[in-house]
Image (cartoon, helix red, strand yellow):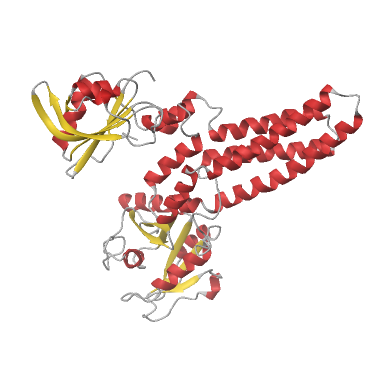
Amino acid sequence: MDDIIVAISTVLGKGAISIVRLSGEGSIELVNKCFKGKDLTNVDSHTINFGYIVDNDKVIDQVLVSIMKAPKTYTREDVVEINCHGGVAVTNKVLELMVLNGARLAEPGEFTKRAFLNGRIDLVEAEAVMDLINSKTEKARVQSINQIEGRLTQIIRNFRQELLELLANVEVNIDYPEYEDIEEVTIDNIKDRVVKMRESLSNIIKESETRKIIKEGINVAIVGRPNVGKSSILNRLLGEEKAIVTDIAGTTRDIVEGSITLNGIQLNFIDTAGIRNTNDVVEQFGVEKSILQIEKADLVILVLNNNEELTLDDKELISKVKNKKYITVINKKDLEEKLDVKSENLANVIYTDTISQDGIESLKNKIIELFNLEEIEGNDIEIFTNTRQITLAKECLKILDDVEEGIKNNVPVDLVAIDIKRIWTKLGEILGENYSDELIDQLFKQFCLGK
């Protein structure tokens, strides 16, 4: 990290301003070579300075330059932000000039990566930065801010401190083996703390898995035979004509997507192609994709036609969704009833019609009920927010079980200490205190440029 990185930190396009950001030792001197105004090397830190970006004697743009000197910066390096006029041509020209004068184009997430590597933030906080940028609902934003503020980090650090204290007790036991009462106290101390830690960690994992939907939303697949009204239901849920609606069976041949926010949670709807046996190659391809969506969905909305008796295709679909969380929508209730709902023991039945919004609110309320959306908040508990964190936490939980089992079986305290050290190390991996270069590179590649 001994070079200067540069990137455009705002969306490239027409706008009031664009920001070109640099970080690294020598950033201030580099920008100063292209700046007409005050001598930036002599200005105070955290000041904004008016002037011009110039290429020799040619003025490129009128700008405001923010100077932030290490270590009190995002990356703990010298950081310079050039606020230029928004526009593709002028922004790219300022960026080009910085590169020509010695800066290197930053990789995705490299500013945050440097913040992590320089000890400014830990890995949990770094991942929260990405979650905040990607958050699409207010609850997701609040959850990300909690992580950035370090609330989960502090819990993990407390766990690790407890484990260090346990290991210290073990060392006393090893150093003074002649005192049998020390071993008894040590084992009792380990047992009590391990039980409490296991309970606390287990609760956080449980809440984390429940509240993953705050970040990721709920993927909802709308499935049914052709012409039962799937696309009409999607359009009414979204409040727009997203999907084509006709009386011709098989109109929807591919996936149609849309999303809404319900009780602060994003619902990602997928209107699938009508599922039926067909010899049409194109339609069959759509049917196969629809079946795949059933397997991937968090919730399936199964649409049946009130005006028709159940067909073999209907019954096959019912069998596919029975092991999923699903809602049965009986559509076209304004037409003559020919469908026998009771014969199939269908769950969560909602009725809708072909021409009005009747039943749509009931459908939304059923989704709220099935996922307890009224109970979910983004700011009431510290949780793990991604698969990496949850997986490591579960590994810690498994080792805690091993520790409890070892104590029950009178395993020597020094062997128990080995498992305690493993837990301490795993918790450190969550924070990024132990990491592989491959993991860090992969994680920060998911960031946008300039962050």
The percent coordinates of residue 341 (x first, y second) are 50, 74
Looking at the image, residue 44 sits to the left or right of residue 185; the answer is left
Q: Quadrant of the C terminus?
A: top left
User: Who is closer to the viewer here, 240 or 249?
Assistant: 240
- Is the residue 314 above or below the residue 140 in the image? below
Looking at the image, residue 143 sits to the left or right of residue 101; the answer is right
**Which residue shows up at 43% across the image and 69% down it?**
363
- Is the residue 306 above or below the residue 6 in the image? below
Whether residue 155 can be seen here: yes
- Is the residue 217 above or below the residue 58 in the image? below
User: Who is closer to the viewer here, 364 or 122?
Assistant: 122
Whether residue 315 can be seen here: no
- Is the residue 208 above or below the residue 35 in the image? below
**Which residue shows up at 60% across the image and 48% down it?**
204
**Which residue shows up at 45% across the image and 42% down it?**
128
User: Who is closer to the viewer here, 13 or 243?
Assistant: 13
Looking at the image, residue 356 sits to the left or right of residue 153; the answer is left
What is the residue that sits farthest to the left in this orientation?
58
Q: How many marks?
A: 0
The percent coordinates of residue 375 (x first, y second) are 53, 63
Q: Quadrant of the N terminus?
A: top left
The percent coordinates of residue 372 (x first, y second) are 53, 63
The percent coordinates of residue 206 (x first, y second) are 60, 51
